[in-house]
Structures are given as structure tokens and as C-alpha cells.
Amino acid sequence: MSAVIQTQSDLFLDSKNLLCPMPIIKLAQAIKQIDAGQTILTETTDPGSQYDIAAWARQTGNELLATEQVGPVFRFLIRKKG
Amino acid sequence: MDAEIQKYINERVEKRVAEILAQREHAENARPKRLALVASKGTLDMAYPPLILASTAVSLGWEAGIFFTFYGLDIVNKTKLPDLKVAPIGNPAMPAPISAIPSLQVPNFVGMLPGMTPMATALMKNWFNRAHIPPLQDLIDVTREGGGKLYACTTTMGVMGVSQENLIEGVECRGAAAFLEFAADATVALFI
């Protein structure tokens, strides 16, 4: 399976090989570096992160634009709330 | 005429009550969610759950506060924090000392031999390192930087002879009433 989500995001965050809570903590820190409306692409390998990142987006109001799985890697494209 | 006045009064009262209820609901929705935790255990394995939950909560934009009580106070004790331990004695979940031979059935009482607690602690720290789990101090920093509160139980401090100078930076000393007031507005409250 090949990646569909384009890597033209404003920021890329590699959280591969990290376990909970690190992908969420790093995502919360990273999103501070971009402006409202900009996007961040993050990649994880923790299976729980599929649900954790969706929950984080709902709780913070940031928009989870797309998710996909490429082999063992989960990819998330998020738009910072305006 | 009286009936008309009564009808008018009823309408006005109902309208006003509806307005107040709507305002109250709006205020409740506008307030951030809050996590209130009691950390009562001072072993390495039991220090992680409250700090993982609190650091995650602030990352979700929630308010968070941890009340460190009894042995849990060790987690915010300057000298004890880097030296929290996990003991194999009485803990059947700990693996055999020789993990290369899993079939070796080591009786649990072996855990009471000298050196077994440091061995189990080193083993667990090694698991955490390998899994890229940060040290406890890093999770404390994330919690504090996100506005999370660290409360030290003043009763425990009195009983154990611990003073504010023994505690890590940013810890506030509180009693049960102050914590309960904080917890009364919590969305999630857990005792760990």
C-alpha cells in the first residue's frame, strides 16, 4: 500500500517508535509552531495512536483531515483550528 | 383581568428562567475539562500512570492537577524522584531474574534476597528506555508547562517529616479541602 496523503504539509512530525503519551505530547507541542489554518503531518507506529490522535483532535478542536496506514506506519494530516 | 396578569407573569418568568439556563449551559461548555488525580503510590511502576494521564490531559487542552499523598509524595520529592524503585517480592507479575530461561520457575521469595529490588528496578528502567518512555521528570515538566498543578498533601508532609525544600520546583502544599474544591469541578477524577 502506498501513501496517498501528500507530504506538502507545513510541518512534519516523526513520532514513529514512540509509545503513548509521547505522540500526543509532541503533537501538542508541535502545533504551537504553526499558524491557524496550516497543516501538520505526523507519523506514528503505536497502534493506540490511531484512536488517541483522533481523540486529541476532537478534544482540542483541531481538524483531522485524513488518516492512512502504510505498512506499520499510521499517518495523520491535521489542520490547526482557526 | 387577574388571569391575564397571571398569564403575563408566567410568560415573563418562563422566558427569564430559559435565559438563565441557557447562560449556565453556555458557561459550562466554555469551561475547559479538568482532570483531578490522587497519586498515592511511590513505586517506579505506579509513578508513571498519574504523570502519563496528567501530561496527556494538558496536551488535550484540559486542566490537570495531581494530589500527591502518602507514598505518592515521593514522586515530587527532590531526592527520591530519581531513585523510585519497584520490588519483585510479593509481585508475581515481575519476570524471573533470568529472563533468558523463562521456564525457570523462580519462587517469589527469591525477590527478598539482597540486590533483587535494585535488579528489578534496573530491569524496569531498561524497558522504559528501550520503549523511548521519557523519565518521570520530563512528564512532570510537560504537565507543569501545560499549566497542570502539583499538590503535595500537607498531612503526609507532617507525618513523613517532609518540608517544602525537599520538594521539586512548582509543587504547592495543600490539604484535602483545597484539593476537593479543585476536584469538585473535575470532568474526570481518579485515585491511583
Image (cartoon, rainbow, N blue to C red):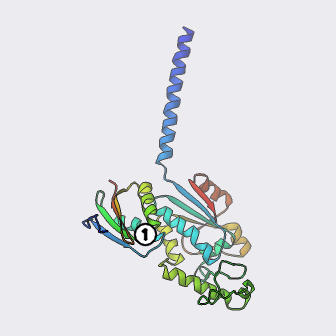
The reply to whether residue B147 is in sight is no
User: Seen in the image, is B182 located left or right of residue A48?
Assistant: right
Q: Is residue B37 visible?
A: yes
* Rendered location of residue A34, percent (x, y): 31, 64
In front here: B118 or B24?
Answer: B118
Residue located at (49% from left, 72% from top): B141
Q: Quadrant of the C terminus of chain B?
A: bottom right
| Residue at x 69%, y 86% (from the top left corner) | B105
* Residue that badge 1 annotates: A23
Image coords of residue B3 (percent x, y): 56, 11
Quarter-of-image position of residue B100: bottom right
Query: What is the chain identity of the residue bearing mark 1?
Result: A
Q: Is residue B104 above or below residue A23?
A: below
> In the image, is residue B49 above or below residue B18?
below
Q: Position of residue B178 (x, y in %)?
A: 64, 58
Q: Which picture quadrant has residue A16?
A: bottom left
Image point (75%, 85%), residue name: B109
Name the amino acid type tagged 1.
Pro
Q: Nearer the viewer, residue A12 or A81?
A: A12
- In this view, which residue lies farthest toward the bottom? B114
- Nearer-the-camera pick, B94 or B188: B94
Question: In the shown orientation, is residue B123 left or right of residue B32?
Answer: right
**Is B96 left or right of A3, judged from the image as shown?**
right
On the image, the x and y values in percent for residue A39 come to: 30, 61
A37 to the left or right of B72: left
